[in-house]
Each structure stands twice: as structure tokens, then as C-alpha cells.
Image (cartoon, rainbow, N blue to C red):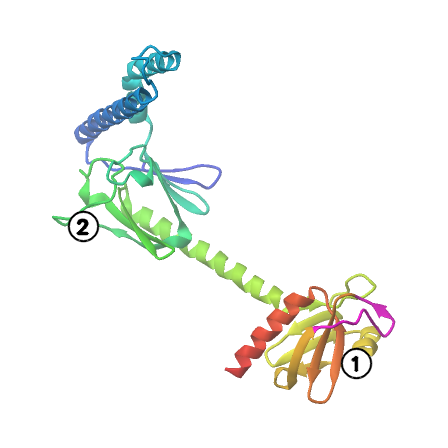
Amino acid sequence: MLVIKDKDMKVKYKFSYGGFFKYLINQIVIFLGSSVEIMFVIFIISRILTLFDGDNHGNSVILNVANTFLGRATFCALPMAAILTAIPRRLILNDSFLKINRYILDPIYFTRGFNDKINYKDIIKCEKYIFCKGRLYPPYAVMPFARKDFVKIVAENDRIEKTYLVPVQNPDDFIKEVWKRVQLAKSKENDETSKAAVTTNMFQFDLQRGYMPDCDEIVLGVNGVEFKTDKATAGLINVKSISYNDIQLCKKSDKHSINGIDSDNIVEIKTATQTYYIPIKNPYDFINELYKKLNTCNQ
């Protein structure tokens, strides 16, 4: 089976090796490489420990314990390499990211670790790849035997591009599935951005009652500040809208009461002809957003 789908909507793709014989070669290379990496790490640790030996010439208790541990680790190096070789290597498409399970530490790309995790919103390219001579390639998940099945994925995060090359069984289907999820992720991101923008344009009166939809709202509209009020609020505010062009000043007022309503969140909006005192929840957020609108209008 080329593609595996589970109940959590994860889609798993197997790597392409180019045939069973090439798969065996790949496993042997990975086993030898993993063995060398494990032995190298053990060697480095042993060299570091000798620095703490001082003048004990290998007789310190700590060093003896450490050497015993390293000796057993060396004995387990080949089984550990065999386990790393036997772990299934796949590409997993989750809801929000693509994971490349390499389980290989490439010395050239040491900082990438054993596996790769790519957020869909960062993907800018996902296409079939044609090999070129004389180029340095990113870390391989498997040996590059099945070159006709290679897919190139380019992700950009904080203006830093990373390239991933992976041989995939059924690459056309994989590319199609990735782009489907990329578009979905970016669509969700745009929806969240739009909702956030709407939220910052709407504020509530700070009144001595519970929130009442459609009559307790202050909206930073296209042309000015709009006040949605009922009869009681209308008598308190005494204004339906204020054009951005008329606003000269907006600041937090020193007043703590207006028309019998106590509030520590009264905002003062001044025009050429009148000054309005309005109790608004989150007054500083309102003032900041209002000045953003005013700056936009003045450009």
C-alpha cells in the first residue's frame, strides 16, 4: 500500500527506494552510518571525561563509573543502530504540518536533527524534482536511488528558506495532497486574521449593566466612529456617529462619572464644535485603534 490513512485523518506516504535490492543497500548504508555516528558520540564523551580525571590517572570513582557506562553503551551500539535502521521511514501529513521521519543525523545538516517538521503555511514550493550535477543536496531520508520519484519542498520561515528532497511513492498524489493542505492552512490563517481585525474595530460601552448586543457597541467604521445605542444609552451618549475628519483629540479622561454613570474608563473625544465623554471598556485599546484609523485617513 502506497498511502496509509488513519482515523485521525493523518496521511502517511512511504519512501521510494527504486526496488527491493536498492532498499537492502539503503538499509545497509543506514546501519553502517548509524553505527559510526553512535561510536563517534561515545568516543567524544570518553575524551571529555578524561578532562575531569585530573591527576588520578584514570582511578577516580566518577571516571570509573563513566567508563563502565560507556563500555556498555559501546556494546549496545550495534543493536541501537539496528533499531534505528528498522524504524519505518515515512512522510506524515497531519492537520497543520508535514513530518519527514528520517531517523538519520546528517553531519552536514547537523542542526536539522533526525527528523523534519514543516508547517503548511510556510511551504512555498512542492514539486517534482530533477537532479542536477554539482549541487549540494539537503539531508536525505533514504539513499537517492529512485530519482524519478523525488519531490522538492521549499519552506520559508522568517525569510529563511529551507529545501527538502524526499523520494515518495506516488509523488503526484503526494504533491496534490500537500497543496490541498497548504491552501486549507492559509485559508484558516486568513480567516483568523479577518476575525481579529473585526474584533479590534468593535468595542463596548462601560455601563452599569450586562452587555446587550446591537445596542452596547462602538464601531470604528469606514468613515467614522459609530455608536449603536438603545434609548437609555442614546440619552447618555447623545451622539450617533463622529466623522474621523472632525476628530481633533482623543484621550483618556480624568472624569470618573458621566450623567450619573460611574466609570473609570471614560474617553474624551474632542471635535471643533463639541467634546464627547464616552465610557468605553478597554479605553486605551480604543484610543490606539482610533488613531490608526485617523492616520490612515490623513495619508
Q: Helix, strand or loop at disc 2?
A: loop
Q: Position of residue 16 (x, y in %)?
A: 25, 37
Q: Residue at x 57, y 62 (%)?
A: 196
Q: Position of residue 88 (x, y in %)?
A: 33, 30
Tell me the quarter of the image containing the N terminus.
top left
* Real-space Cα separation, disc 1 to disc 2, in angstroms: 70 Å
Q: Position of residue 76 (x, y in %)?
A: 31, 16
Vertical order, 241 against 199 (above or below)? below
Vertical order, 288 against 80 (above or below)? below
Furthest-front residue in view?
55
Q: Position of residue 295 (x, y in %)?
A: 54, 78
Furthest-left residue in view?
133
Counting other residues with Cα less than 10 Å from the Cα at mark 1, is it few (<14), some (14-19), or many (20 or more)?
some
Label located before the other in sequence (1 or 2): 2
Name the amino acid type tagged 1: Asn
Name the amino acid type tagged 2: Ile
Q: Helix, strand or loop at disc 1?
A: loop
Would you say residue 6 sits in the magenta stretch?
Answer: no
Q: Residue at x 65, y 86 (%)?
A: 246
Q: Residue at x 31, y 13 (%)?
A: 71
**Residue identifier under label 2:** 130
Which region of the structure is painted magenta?
252-263
Counting other residues with Cα less than 10 Å from the Cα at mark 2, is it few (<14), some (14-19), or many (20 or more)?
few
Name the image quarter holding residue 84: top left
Left or right of 176, for residue 106: left
Would you say residue 255 sits in the magenta stretch?
Answer: yes
**Residue identifier under label 1:** 238
Left or right of 252, for residue 104: left
